[in-house]
Image (cartoon, grey):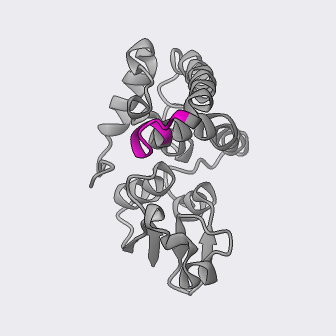
Amino acid sequence: MKIYGDVYSGNCYKLKLICALLAIEHEWIPVDILKGDTRSENFLALNPNGQIPVCVTVEGDVLTESNAILYYLAQGSQYWPQDRLAQTRVLEWQFFEQYSHEPSIAVARFIKLYQGMPEDRKDEYQARLKAGYRALGLMEQHLENNRFLVGDNCSIADISLFAYTHVAPEGGFELSKFPAIENWVARIQALDGFISMAG
């Protein structure tokens, strides 16, 4: 199996983390989006959408979209629940991650950390910051009464949201305002096989 990605991208780190937790053998192929790697002819032949991560299975099937790949990798493991309702709850959180969480927290982090807060994106940054705090507030409210996002065990819902949440301070978010999230982050970091974003 080959995974194309940038470990400092939360969407790619999700896959790095689930592979570590489940001891899934794979070849990691670094992709530098800032150097235009995702716009190369070879990469676009893999994913015409020009986005990472991309997973090429042992059988040669090309998989895209981080949460879809997470589902593929986690099936049959403790990170994908067997109960139908719990499975739906996992999907709810993953859709929340891609629609409400990632577009605010990841983009704020990109503007601040990778672009150095250019003048023409400051207003957008403030808007992303506001939306990101709202998303974190919803997570905090839920985690005040729950060990993990779905039930008592870590699932790919947690992996999805952990990826950008734990580095949210790099985007200017103060996680100290969210003690339940901080405790949840610590629980994930304590999982057997956990690997950090930097590896």
**Frontmost residue, 182 versus 177:** 177
Q: In the image, is 42 to the left or to the right of 198?
A: right
- Quarter residue 112 falls in: top left
Look at the image and tell me in which quarter the C terminus lies. bottom left
Please tell me which residue is depicted at 38% across the width and 34% down the height of the picture: 170
Q: In the image, is 28 to the left or to the right of 71?
A: left
User: Residue 52 colored magenta?
Assistant: no
Q: In the image, is 9 to the left or to the right of 141?
A: left
User: Residue 114 colored magenta?
Assistant: yes
Q: In the image, is 91 to the left or to the right of 27?
A: right
Please tell me which residue is depicted at 67% across the width and 45% down the height of the picture: 87
Query: Residue 124: percent from the left, percent from the top?
Result: 62, 31
Query: Residue 24: percent from the left, percent from the top?
Result: 39, 68
**Residue 154 visible (yes or no):** no
- Quarter residue 70 falls in: bottom right
Query: Magenta stretch?
Result: 111-119
Please tell me which residue is depicted at 37% across the width and 54% down the height of the picture: 21
Q: How many marks?
A: 0
- Quarter residue 123 falls in: top right
Q: Is residue 194 above or below residue 4?
A: above
Query: Residue 2: percent from the left, percent from the top?
Result: 45, 77
Look at the image and tell me in which quarter the N terminus lies. bottom left
Query: Residue 15: percent from the left, percent from the top?
Result: 46, 59
